[in-house]
């Protein structure tokens, strides 16, 4: 799998500008996940809601900025968007854009209900259209099992479950139940192919390894969505999905040595939303059970998730600066060789 499709770079070897990799769309989704965690945390701790709203504003700005960067670069390249969407590594990652918009819509609903509902509904419609298109594309029989990675959970499973959560939060209960059913069904379907690929095919290339973290997001988001759908009353399904989340977290712990061996790339943003989803579910359980020192534990969870995302954001900025400087030095070196 060519690494250039999953790393930030300014120009190709021929000097032609390429499209921005679609894995950068994980940035607004990760920040939206962080906003969700802070919204739950501040509510549990009785803190001013303005703290959570500030994080939602940051997520919304990052969503608009990321989309603008993709559109701007797209107008300055000969590489078509359809080719990028049909790429078996990148294509599924396009679902990150409407998924993040769903969460931002639910966040907006808390302050401007009508606007939040409209944004959530439009985002879910866009996600459904893309999911139907990409599923039809996969069913053409051209995809190899080696192409499957954690991002394949995004277009249908993750979009369905996040849609269920946000629809329930914006009062669209009828839509939430249907979206939940779609998300659960395709979570099971994609999981079969995903684990077959991991067990029966060669190891994933390094740029794709961070997508393994995505496997913890579906059960965590599904648990949160079902709790909303069931009116905030924990039941056996919520408990079962929480147990599945805990098991997926255990798998991630076993994968830590592989993660630590990876060089930093923008693919590390793949860790942010899954971690935030688990943290949000953990805070929900802490608020339900209220064990000893649960408020201090909640503060620790908020601090840990925030620190992780801030570190990834800081390293991403440094990587972007280094990549830009390297790209500027390449033409200079070429000119010196021509003069010599």
Image: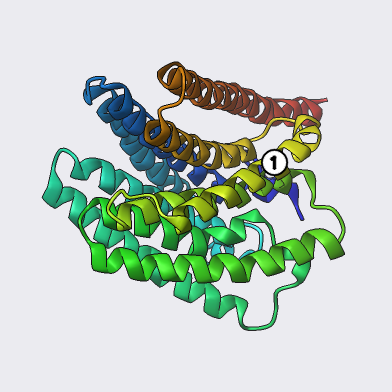
Answer left or right for 337 relative to 277: right
**Residue 79 in sight:** no
**Residue that protrudes farthest toward the bottom in the picture:** 140
Q: Could you say where residue 116 lies in the image, as x and y percent from the top left?
A: 20, 49
* Residue 139 in the figure: left or right of residue 256: left
Q: Looking at the rendering, which quadrant does residue 264 occupy?
A: top right
- Depth check, front residue: 134 or 81: 134
Secondary structure under badge 1? helix
Q: Position of residue 158 (x, y in %)?
A: 49, 57
The residue labelled by disc 1 is 250
Is 325 rendered above or below residue 265? above
Quadrant of the frame with the C terminus = top right
Q: Identify which residue is drawn at 44% across, 16% down.
A: 296
Question: Which residue is rendered at x = 81% and y = 33% of the image?
Answer: 257
The picture places residue 336, in percent across and down from the top left corner, at 76, 25
Does 118 appear above or below 270?
below
Find residue 322 and report its horizontal and vertical position in percent.
Answer: 64, 23
The residue at the point 78 percent across, 64 percent down is 197
Foreground residue among 11 and 67: 67
């Amino acid at each position: 799998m060519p690494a250039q499709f999953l790393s930030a770079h300014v120009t190709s070897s021929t000097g032609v500008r390429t499209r921005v990799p679609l894995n950068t769309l994980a940035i607004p989704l990760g920040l939206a996940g962080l906003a969700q965690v802070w919204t739950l945390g501040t509510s549990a701790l009785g803190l001013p809601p303005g703290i959570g709203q500030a994080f939602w504003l940051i997520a919304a700005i990052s969503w608009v900025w990321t989309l603008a960067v993709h559109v701007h670069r797209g107008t300055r390249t000969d590489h078509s968007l359809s080719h990028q969407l049909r790429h078996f590594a990148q294509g599924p990652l396009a679902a990150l854009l409407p998924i993040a918009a769903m969460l931002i819509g639910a966040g907006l609903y808390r302050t401007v209900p009508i606007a939040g509902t409209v944004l959530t509904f439009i985002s879910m419609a866009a996600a459904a259209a893309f999911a139907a298109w990409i599923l039809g594309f996969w069913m053409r029989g051209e995809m190899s099992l080696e192409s499957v990675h954690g991002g394949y959970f995004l277009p249908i499973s993750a979009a369905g479950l996040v849609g269920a959560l946000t629809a329930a939060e914006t009062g669209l209960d009828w839509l939430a139940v249907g979206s939940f059913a779609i998300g659960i069904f395709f979570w099971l379907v994609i999981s079969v192919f995903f684990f077959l690929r991991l067990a029966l095919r060669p190891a994933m290339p390094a740029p794709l390894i961070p997508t393994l973290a995505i496997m913890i997001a579906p059960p965590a988001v599904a648990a949160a969505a079902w709790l909303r759908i069931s009116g905030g009353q924990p039941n056996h399904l919520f408990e079962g999905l929480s147990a599945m989340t805990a098991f997926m977290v255990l798998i991630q712990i076993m994968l830590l040595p592989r993660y630590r061996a990876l060089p930093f790339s923008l693919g590390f943003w793949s860790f942010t939303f899954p971690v935030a989803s688990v943290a949000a579910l953990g805070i929900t359980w802490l608020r339900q059970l209220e064990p000893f020192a649960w408020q201090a534990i909640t503060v620790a969870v908020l601090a840990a998730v925030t620190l992780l995302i801030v570190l990834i954001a800081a390293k991403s900025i440094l990587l972007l600066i280094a990549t830009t400087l390297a790209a500027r030095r390449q033409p200079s070196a070429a000119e010196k060789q021509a003069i010599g």
